[in-house]
Amino acid sequence: MLLRKKKRVRDRYAIQMPLTSLIDIVFLLLIYFLLTTNFITEQGIDVNLPDAEASSPQTRQEITVYIDKAGMVFVGDQPVDFNDLFDRLKDRIAANPKQLVVIKADGSIALDRAVQVMDIAQAAGAQSLFLATEKQN
């Protein structure tokens, strides 16, 4: 009996794509987009706050009152007639009397307008009243 040697059948190699370089490219793109994306911290009324040397961030819930360059008053992002401001603030403060009332007035407006809004907020029952500023560099 003769033993025959079997012919070696070579396994075909499947086509392989190197994933290491592909993963590197994906991570580089991810880092690029993370670094170049603008993160918007707050949307709302365009107000340039006055500078102050000692300002600290507030983290509690708040009612924000904006006063823009033209002297228009906004509660949150809703425009409010100056005559209706007392009623609007009284309704919002009645829901939670310990909420902060933060006034973000444009630095170019007359201080008189900001003081009027502060007086109205205090008359509406605001216990904590703040005038927002930006920290000087």
Image (cartoon, rainbow, N blue to C red):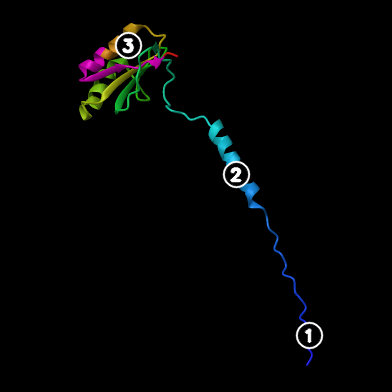
- CA neighbours of label 2 inside 10 A, class few (<14), some (14 to 19), many (20+): few
Relative side of 107 to 83, left or right: right
- The residue indicated by pointer 1 is 4
N-terminal of the pair, mark 1 or mark 2, is 1
Asked where in the image residue 51 lies, by quadrant, the reply is top left
Q: Is residue 15 left or right of residue 66?
A: right
Mark 3, secondary structure of its residue: helix
Residue 21: x percent and y percent? 65, 47
Q: Quadrant of the N terminus?
A: bottom right
Give the spatial CA distance, label 2 vs label 3.
Answer: 51 Å
Percent x, y of residue 63:
30, 24
* Residue 26, disc: 2
- Whether residue 126 appears in this view of the structure is no
Q: Is disc 2 placed on a helix, strand or loop?
A: helix
**Residue at x 74%, y 71% (from the top left corner):** 10
Kindly identify the amino acid type of the residue bearing the numbered disc 1: Arg
Q: Position of residue 39 (x, y in %)?
A: 48, 30
- Determine if residue 77 is in view: yes
Q: How many marks?
A: 3
What is the number of the mark on residue 114? 3
User: How far apart are the alpha carbons under marks 1 and 2?
Assistant: 53 Å
Q: Residue at x 25, y 12 (%)?
A: 119
- The residue mark sitting in front, 3 or 1, is 1
**Kind of element beneath mark 1:** loop
Magenta region:
119-135
Of badges 1 and 2, the one in the foreground is: 1
The amino acid marked with disc number 3 is Ala
- Please name whichever residue, 19 or 47, is drawn nearer the observer in this view of the structure: 19
* Earlier residue among tags 2 and 3: 2
